[in-house]
Image: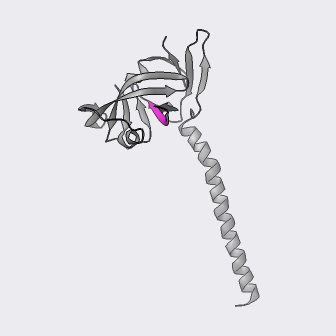
Amino acid sequence: MSENDVTTSFGKGFVWIAWVIGLALLVFVFQDLLDDQYNPNQDPKLSLQSNGQAQVTLQQNRQGHYLTNGAINGEKVTFLLDTGATQVSIPAHIAEKLSLQAGGKSRVQTANGSIAVYQTQINELRIGNIYLYNVAAHINPSMNANEILLGMSALKRVEFRQTGKQLILREQL
């Protein structure tokens, strides 16, 4: 093998490394953009009204849904607001990470048919600066999502109003 062949091989190797690094940087940069489009409320807009009411303003994502980061019992989670869900519905794999206790088994009707769920209680649920305590929920072993459906067992305890592509949540006094 001549010196010229070694140099050519070495040069081709660097070109491949440069391409891999370039693609990795593009993925890194654009992943944040995609994450913001999927969940534009990773850091929801908070405010306090003159009467002391906590308020959170959420932006609709590209699919028309409202997702937001929040917390259950101090652990960070992502919520998908679902006014069609009777209760907060937590995928079993997330409930396990949150150390939620599964209670009585019951059947519920979902868009995908009838399924078995387990009742649980959330001590503290937080969306921005709105805190809810002792929220009824269920653990859903049939749900594989990474989001928790924020159903009416929580949403009925806040005032909410949609204006355009924004949803304003306000704590009830």
Residue at 42 percent of width and 42 percent of height: 97
Camera-nearest residue between 43 and 131 = 131
Does residue 64 appear in this view?
A: no
State whether residue 50 is above or below residue 25. Answer: above
Residue at 57 percent of width and 44 percent of height: 34
Does residue 3 appear in this view?
A: yes
Rendered-image quadrant of the N terminus: bottom right
Residue 84 in the image, given as x and y percentages of width and height: 37, 26
Which range of residues does the magenta coloring cover? 76-81
Camera-nearest residue between 122 and 147 = 122
State whether residue 141 is above or below residue 158. Answer: below
Residue at 41 percent of width and 27 percent of height: 123
Majority secondary structure of the magenta segment? strand
Residue 126 in the image, given as x and y percentages of width and height: 49, 27
Left or right of residue 13, residue 101 in this image: left
Residue 30 in the image, given as x and y percentages of width and height: 62, 48
Residue 17 in the image, given as x and y percentages of width and height: 67, 67
State whether residue 70 is above or below residue 133. Answer: below
Left or right of residue 124, residue 101 in this image: left
Magenta-drawn stretch contains 116: no
Left or right of residue 26, residue 114 in this image: left
Magenta-drawn stretch contains 79: yes
Camera-nearest residue between 136 and 144 = 136
